Image (tube, rainbow, N blue to C red):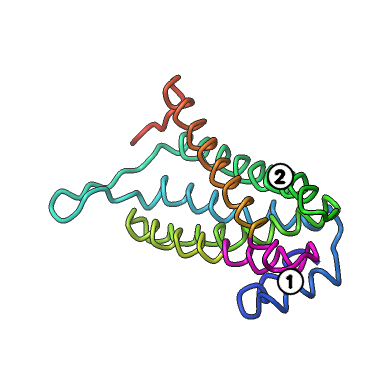
Amino acid sequence: MILNHLWGIYTQPKEEWKTIDKQHESYFSSLSHILIIALIPAGMAFYASAYLGWDIGAGSTSETIRLTMNSAMAMSVAMYFGLVVGVIALAVLIHKLANAFETSPTYTQCLEIAAYTATPMFMAGFGAFYPQLWFLMSVFLVGLSYSVYLLYTGVPIMLHIPEDKGFIFSSSVVTCGLVLMVILMASSVILWSIGLGPQYT
């Protein structure tokens, strides 16, 4: 069932990873989880950018910035596909890295790890209900921290490797994830520089 581990990864992460390991879901189910959960940050980014506006600055210098409907929609769609591709790419990297650690998970198992690890970071998109940059960054950092925690707790269980190897493996995955994030940010800058940047109201 889609999203059926969502509550467990927050309330009892280690036990939930064990449940996921025992009851592996299909590739389609794992992919569906990503496709649904990625709607949260993309949808909230659209709503905040087009309707609520972003407050830049502080005090009397604060300025509310909104995007045009078309611009907000285009950026949200690009964000959605970027997030989905990023999680799938992370799953591919996990699958490739596993060979160096003498374990051979299926690609679906790697996709499960990537999907459920990314979930708290995507759920942080709800922070856009209060479109203050400092608040959103704080919520994002909390989501990112919990995603990293899930990765470190889930890898030894899902890949059936000792915790010390799991720590090294997870650290490698975090490094690859940071590289992917930089690539996405660089791609955004390139698109903006060629005239595909946001249009303000």
Taking the image as shown, residue 141 lies to the left or right of residue 108, namely left
Residue furthest toward the left?
A: 60
Front-most of residues 84 and 171 = 171
Label 1 amino acid? Trp
Which type of secondary structure does the marked residue at label 1 adopt? helix
Q: Which residues are magenta?
A: 147-167
Considering only order in the chain, which callout, 2 or 1, is on the residue closer to the N terminus? 1
Q: Residue at the location (67% across, 70% down)?
A: 6
Which type of secondary structure does the marked residue at label 2 adopt? helix
Q: Residue at the location (45% across, 39% down)?
A: 69
The reply to whether the magenta stretch includes residue 190 is no
Front-most of residues 131 and 23 = 23
Q: Which mark is residue 93?
A: 2
Q: Where does the C terminus fall, quadrant-wise?
A: top left
With respect to residue 173, does 179 lie above or below?
above
Label 2 amino acid? Leu
Give residue 18's position: percent from left, percent from top: 77, 74
Q: Where does the N terminus fall, quadrant-wise?
A: bottom right
Give residue 5's position: percent from left, percent from top: 72, 71
Q: Residues within 10 Å of mark 2 (few under 14, many from 20)?
A: some
Q: Which mark is residue 17?
A: 1
Give residue 11's position: percent from left, percent from top: 62, 80
